Amino acid sequence: MSRSIKSFIDAWTSAKPNKAARNDTATSVWYDWFCSDEGLYNRTIKFIHPLKRILEEVPGAKDFSASGKNCCPFSGPLYDILCIFDGNEFVCFMSFDDARQDHRFQVETATEVTYDGDDREAAINAMIVATKNYIANLLK
């Protein structure tokens, strides 16, 4: 399942005073999870800043969609992935806290790893650049 980035952020913002409404909004962006609903809500919070930055800094991103996946590896704790799509086309993803990796954050496109490190803001910036590059390649 994925949801328009803009509609998700708008719904999240309008549900702010109501945690139950925010929980419903949170589940609307995830397509697979293994944690509790409360855990899912808390995991969704870390997606908000990257998605807001993409909307602010990437012209055309309001037409893109996002989806989250709470991954359950055979060994290690749960970790999360935030994926960005243009319709059915994969743009990029950012993984959060995959204990099997050397660093906390990874950003990947269909062809390369664009970030692998521990700086959250640098990972978000890499995701923004990957999204901008995707759009630039469409315009060629």
Image (tube, helix red, strand yellow):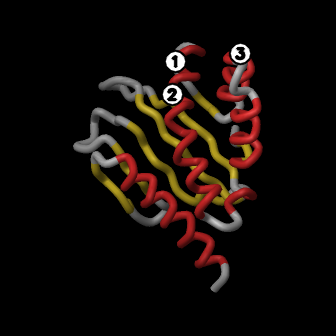
Q: Residue 118: horizontal and vertical position, in percent? A: 28, 46
Q: Crowdedness of circle 2 by 10 Å Cα count: few (<14), some, many (20+)?
A: some
Q: Which secondary structure, mark 3?
A: helix
Residue at point 67% right, 26% down?
27
Report the front residue among 79 and 14.
Answer: 14
Left/right placement of residue 2 relative to residue 32 reads: right
On-image quarter of the C terminus: bottom right
Left/right placement of residue 61 relative to residue 115 reads: right
Q: Crowdedness of circle 1 by 10 Å Cα count: few (<14), some, many (20+)?
A: few
**Three-letter amino acid code at the position of disc 3:** Ala
* Placement of 34 over or under 86, stated as above or below: above
User: Disc 2 designates what residue?
Assistant: 43
**Three-letter amino acid code at the position of disc 2:** Arg
Residue at point 62% right, 72% down?
135
Of circles 2 and 3, the one toward us is 3
| Image mark for residue 20 | 3
Left/right placement of residue 138 relative to residue 42 reads: right
Residue at point 22% right, 43% down?
102
